[in-house]
Image (cartoon, coloured by chain):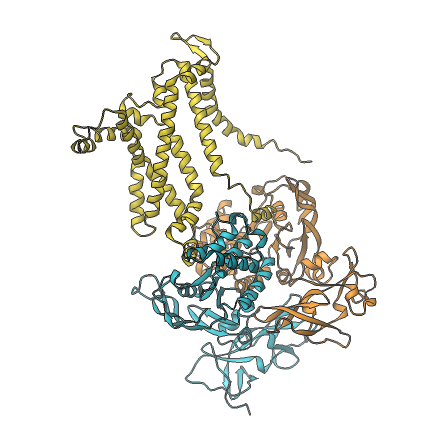
Amino acid sequence: MKPVNHKAWFLVAPVLLLVAISAIIPLMTVVNYSVQYVGSTGRFAWVGDEWYREVLHSEKFWNALWRNLVFSGVILAIQIPLGVLIALNMPRKGWGVPTCLVLMALPLLIPWYVVGMIWQMFGRVDIGLMGVMLRDFGYNYEGDPMDAWFTLILMDVWHWTSLVALLAYAGLVSIPDAYYQAARIDGASKWAVFRFIQLPRLGRVLTIAILLRFMDSFMIFTEPFAVIAGGDPVFLSTELKQTVELGKKAAMSIIYFLIILAVSWVFYAVMTRNDGEPTSADKARGGGA
Amino acid sequence: MLELRGVFRRVGGVAYLSDVSLRLEPGTLNVLLGPTLSGKTSLIRVMAGLDRPSAGSVLFDGQDVTDRPVSKRNVAMVYQQFVNYPGWTVRENIASPLKVRGTAPAEIEREVKRVADLLRLRDYLDRRPMELSGGQQQRVALARAIVKKAGLVLLDEPLANLDYKLREDLRVELPRLFADSAAVVVYATTEPSEALLLDGVTVAMHEGRAVQSGPTQSVYREPQDLTTARIFSDPPINTLPVEAAINPARFAGATTLALRAHHVRLQPRSAASDVYIAEVESIEINGSESFVRLNVRGQHWVMLARGIHTFAPGTSLTVYVEPDDMMQFDAAGRAIPSKREAA
Amino acid sequence: MARLDLSNIRHIYGPPGEGEPQYALRHVNQAFEHGGAYALLGPSGCGKTTLLNIISGLVHPSEGRVRIDGVDVTDKPTEKRNIAQVFQFPVIYDTMTVRENLEFPLRNRGVAAAQIKRRVDEVIEMIGLGALARRRARGLSADEKQKVSLGRGLVREDVSAILFDEPLTVIDPEVKWTLRTQLRELQRRSGMTMIYVTHDQTEALTFASGVVVMHEGQVLQVGSPKDLFEKPAHTFVGYFIGSPGMNVLPTKVDGAALRIGEYFAPLTSEPRLRGNPKLELGIRPEFVRLAAEGIPATIERIEDIGRHRIVRTRMLGHSVTALLQEHEPIPADPHLYFEPEGVHLYADSWRVELSGKPAP
């Protein structure tokens, strides 16, 4: 027989209210739009799942989704190993530490839109450093979709690898010295140290890095818009921008949202699979003396 | 006075406390003695108001405080870990409970000095906790608890993380620190010798129950059952089934005999001593005493011998036991009063 | 297996040259014999861990040489020294199983598979982790993890020595009892040289046959547990070993006796002294008797801890602690009597060996 204390609900109430205002209500509005036809005069008409069906049957949508996934995949495949590699080579003490940290943080401080502008300039064939150099090597940059792809990936790598590096660095410095000493005594090679000490201990941090980078790259919008100004390649977000009908837009947003939620959840579930396993020590401690 | 009436605490089907009823008085040290997981910390948390009992009530000076949260209870707590504000000096740390209360600066200054003298921290007032040794850090935490003048002071194994020499020094000082305080002081420990040194009142804890409580010496010398005798013995108490004893007829009604390690002797104390032949299993040495692990009639015993002994494992030893030192327990583990007490 | 020699080791913290040097180690000469069980014992900050790290090569000493079997290894890195070390907190490879953890040091050195299997089987049996061999190491309890670290130290048969840095810190008190004895047993069975760092006298004295007591970067005494108790070479050893520690009182030498105020404590023989050192009398509480005659004292407090009573007295303005057995009576008008075999003389804190002619 345990008395229930209802006072606790008052403590949770403000948070519930905040979440309701910031997330649930807007989301519900979007859900509402997605099942209606919104006319130019503001007239609403119930259309059921028609918008969803239209979106899911459009080839354009699937192409955009595919491109998005490939883009995120490529980004992760480059940024995660590169970030870890940079972190491994960053200094651990002395004046190099603050210098390195500030340098790494710099790209993160630049607004997305500006990054797009910078790279657009950079790639121009007439005045851009990269464009001109590539032209001198006999390659005519700009113009074909592959070039745009290449630029986008380069841009994202430049912009965001340091986030991964900083997270990984924080994870690395938290490994106690004794682990490295033990590894030296056990005669472990540099690779073994990485494989059996550093990588396992970076697990949690890298989970967060991958999640952040996936969600962010999947939502890529500002950058392609700045680089290509609406041309190819088309991502979900640009597709969304170009859609005119409010109802269709809403349906696309919902689908988009569900995809991100699902993929993030799968990532998270896979990567934290081992953490849940309680140790016998935890079990013993659970008693709480 | 702190009173617990029939306190239970269960979380998710696991019982942490079962039917604990206690009356703890100010002016003495109340020691909760028991091994890890015996419920000491759970009990302290209920006393503090950090956890609510699943059933039963907590009374302070006759007032029911069961539903009063910790923030409204005027409780001071010292933990096993040294918990201080790292960014503040020792002076600021000690003054913090008084500042919160809005005490006048002159009064704060006076109190900080008094307590700093008491805990021998006078020379360290302007340092930060991290610049101090573990013993000094724990003194700062104790000083904060004392200066707060709380009605209830809870000390949860405060010396467990200190070097043994520091532990020895602080252990001697502790009773003095709280001697003139009006607070109810509760001290949790796993070590029998600590309970004995602090004197006062001891509550023996086992599996969430308070198995016996009373003046420390009487709980130590007259445990009501074998469980309490075990809790209150370090090294572990030696047991012997009565039929394996010499002349078992003397122990009529008893099933198990128990004997503390220092009552196993290398020399007889009297003509009435029983003689047992033992085989040495191993030896541990603590600087001035030796713990000799023995096999006596198939039982694993520990003998605590003064001085340093280095018997090789396998050595055969003659050891002496006073029949009067044997505690007697019946089949249910309850103590049978010995002749000595009856007399 | 081998003999280890430390000669003229000094170690300074921080950059040299600026102001008073901060010595972690002042001047250490120490030999560790082949197959011995040693403990480095001292309070925190005494330099014992630094000394251990100098042996394993994790720290390079500011001065002095480290030799293994006569070969100077001072400038050799850890991995070239053939030394195993077990740390205070269990260091395990989380993602490996218990067995893989134990195989790791051997695999890294290219030991043949059959030999690895034989040796790892042996060690698993030795540390009693047979049932857990296939378990992933991350799920183990603290003491199981520490056993795995221990096992990784034992697994290499070619090591010169195994070093332990307070290995039982995170272990529950009840388990400590067994682990301590097991470790001693392992040392005996394996015949390996082991050096064990701790601040806990019970751990040190139980484990080691040679205990090195350190304080403020100096070795104060090297001896058997019996030596440390019966003949503490320095007043600090007397204080640190044994609980309660040794009583230390200012004194004067008067022939074959020590004088405290107008009273005398006889010595076994007459001491020879050079210069004009600060003289102190040291006596362990075990050798102080409460008697009807002797030096008058007042009793300040009695602590009854069951197996004996600690009697805190004041004698001629000094605190003196005595130990009383359970049934020993306390006289109404107490005097203190110092048993001669327990009386030591200290000159500038160092014990004066009384080897002169017997007292008349």
Chain seen in yellow? A
Q: Is residue C145 above or below residue C27?
A: above
Q: Is residue C149 above or below residue A119?
A: below
Q: Is residue C300 visible?
A: no
Q: Is residue C152 above or below residue C356?
A: above
Closer to the camera, B254 or A260?
A: A260
Q: Is residue B52 visible?
A: yes
Q: Is residue C138 above or below residue C321?
A: above
Residue drawn at (79%, 60%) of the image: B255
Closer to the camera, C231 or C259?
A: C231
Number of marks in picture:
0
Residue drawn at (50%, 26%) of the image: A17
Chain seen in orange? B
Q: What is the quadrant of the C terminus of chain B in the image?
A: bottom right
Closer to the camera, C149 or B6?
A: C149
Chain seen in cyan? C
Residue A171, x across and y down, in percent? 40, 45
> Left or right of B341: which side holds A27?
left
Residue drawn at (43%, 10%) of the image: A37
Closer to the camera, B34 or A178?
A: A178
Instruction: Give the image quarter of residue B307.
Output: bottom right
Residue C174, x across and y down, in percent? 61, 58
Residue furthest bottom as drawn: C360
Residue B18, x across and y down, in percent? 69, 46
> Left or right of C28: which side holds C130?
right
